[in-house]
Amino acid sequence: MLQITNRTTIPIREISISAIRSQGAGGQNVNKVATAIHLRFDINASSSPLYLYKERLLNLGYQRITKDGIIIIKAQQHHY
């Protein structure tokens, strides 16, 4: 479970995590290895009782939420 608040959680099975190729400078391994992560969460399909949160999230107009109600977060970090 992913703890959102003291009373609100999201089952881990409802979060999809996949390795992807990162963008930007990368030297020899650029476009060869998966160096970033995509996290996806379908707001509408969630079994969690997040009704108030679901409505708020869907009405945000946030660029990381697709028109189908899927939150997509890309995690990528550079260390030099």
Image (cartoon, grey):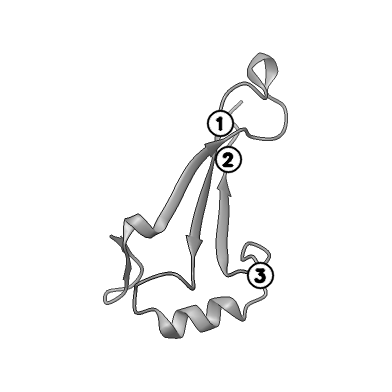
Q: Residues within 10 Å of mark 3 (few under 14, many from 20)?
A: few
Mark pair 3, 2: CA separation: 24 Å
Residue 53 drawn above or below residue 70: below
Q: Which residue is mark 1?
A: 35
Q: Earlier in the sequence, mark 3 or mark 2?
A: 3
Q: Which residue is mark 2?
A: 76
Q: Is 76 placed left or right of 9 in the picture?
A: right
Q: Percent x, y for residue 31?
A: 67, 25
Write the residue at 49% across / 73% down. 44
Q: Percent x, y for residue 65?
A: 61, 66
Residue type beneath disc 1? Thr
Helix, strand or loop under label 1:
loop
Q: Which residue is mark 3?
A: 67
Residue farthest toward the top in the current orientation of the protein: 28
Disc 1 vs disc 2: Cβ atoms closer than 8 Å?
A: yes
Q: Residues within 10 Å of mark 2 (few under 14, many from 20)?
A: few
Residue 2 drawn above or below residue 39: below
